[in-house]
Image: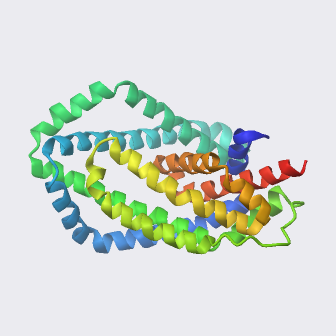
């Protein structure tokens, strides 16, 4: 498998291997439970803040953003319901023979339904937005719409910090994770004799801190439809792109290879943006930081193998 398509398939295949999937679940589930507890304790104080921020925004913008958030919620529900119905129909016929292929099926089915329902919503965007924003939401007082938007903004903030915590844990303890992948995929790939000083831990902590600062600064802009989606994509991609690259090169790159690969900024950003889009897909989103790391790892190793040929 060559090229970016091969990198994607290798990363997906690794993600659903049980030794690697186990590491993902052992990290993701406890952090998820932890953030649910933090959210339960801090929900009301944060809701006061987000409600105040939304009160500064004109009702027309709040209404448009409310329509977008409702459509996003309906999209997520449609994806999960479609996946559940398909799984229920296939379970008696196929799953007994599937074994480990169930994880690949889940990723593929969820991705397919996410694209399908997303396309249907975009194709009928004008009609749906008009029905929700101009008919449904105008019947509700500003306070009701604002409170609903504040709840969703609260959820986004806690979800963002959950993704950030996954990213930081993986960034600080990526060595064992990447060693496990190397033993499976590239057992003959030699470790460089000379380590590359990439300052990846400092970069990960620095980017994590800046991510928090930028999230706070951009909170008012998160109420503007489309702009909020673009901001989220940028913040997640910006978070992934440098630390994953530097952290992998600290283990698997010679200084010469590190300098050569740094010039491929488009590829580094492209991998980060693609992985960031998966943060929007239900269930798959808890695997996104690991998937981003796997894609960066495979690209870096394959580039060095190609250079040796």
Q: Residue at 71% across / 54% down in the picture?
A: 261
Q: Residue at 14% across / 55% down in the picture?
A: 55
Q: Is residue 263 visible?
A: yes
Q: Give the image quarter of residue 186.
A: bottom right
Residue 25 rendering spot, x and y as whole percentages = 59, 64
* Frontmost residue, 224 versus 35: 224
Q: How many marks?
A: 0
Q: Residue at 56% across / 49% down in the picture?
A: 275
Q: Is residue 244 above or below residue 69?
A: below
Residue 90 rendering spot, x and y as whole percentages = 60, 37
Residue 73 rendering spot, x and y as whole percentages = 35, 44
Q: Is residue 156 above or below residue 166?
A: above
* Frontmost residue, 128 versus 309: 309
Residue 187 rendering spot, x and y as whole percentages = 87, 61
Drawn side of residue 294 relative to residue 232, left or right: right
Q: Residue at 47% across / 49% down in the picture?
A: 282
* Frontmost residue, 86 versus 211: 211
Q: Is residue 67 above or below residue 27?
A: above
Q: Give the image quarter of residue 42.
A: bottom left
């Amino acid at each position: 498998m060559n090229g970016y398509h091969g990198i994607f398939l290798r990363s997906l295949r690794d993600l659903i291997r049980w030794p690697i999937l186990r590491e993902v679940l052992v990290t993701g589930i406890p952090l998820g439970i932890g953030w649910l507890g933090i959210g339960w304790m801090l929900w009301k104080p944060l809701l006061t803040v987000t409600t105040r921020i939304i009160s500064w925004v004109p009702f027309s913008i709040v209404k448009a953003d409310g329509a977008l958030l409702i459509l996003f919620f309906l999209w997520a529900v449609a994806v999960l319901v479609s996946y559940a119905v398909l799984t229920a129909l296939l379970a008696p016929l196929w799953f007994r023979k599937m074994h480990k292929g169930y994880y690949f099926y889940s990723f593929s089915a969820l991705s397919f339904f996410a694209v399908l329902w997303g396309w249907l919503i975009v194709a009928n965007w004008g009609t749906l937005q008009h029905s929700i924003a101009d008919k449904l939401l105008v019947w509700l007082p500003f306070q009701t719409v604002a409170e609903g938007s504040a709840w969703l903004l609260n959820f986004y903030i806690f979800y963002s910090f959950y993704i950030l915590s996954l990213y930081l844990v993986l960034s600080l303890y990526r060595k064992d994770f990447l060693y496990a992948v190397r033993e499976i995929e590239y057992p003959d790939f030699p470790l460089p004799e000379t380590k590359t000083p990439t300052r990846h831990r400092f970069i990960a902590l620095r980017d994590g801190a800046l991510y928090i600062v930028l999230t706070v600064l951009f909170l008012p802009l998160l109420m503007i439809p489309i702009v909020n989606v673009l901001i989220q994509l940028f913040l997640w991609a910006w978070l992934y792109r440098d630390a994953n690259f530097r952290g992998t090169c600290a283990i698997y790159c010679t200084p010469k290879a590190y300098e050569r690969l740094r010039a491929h900024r488009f590829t580094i950003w492209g991998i980060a943006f693609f992985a960031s889009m998966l943060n929007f897909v239900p269930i798959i989103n808890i695997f996104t930081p690991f998937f981003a790391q796997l894609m960066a790892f495979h690209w870096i190793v394959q580039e060095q193998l190609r250079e040796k040929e």
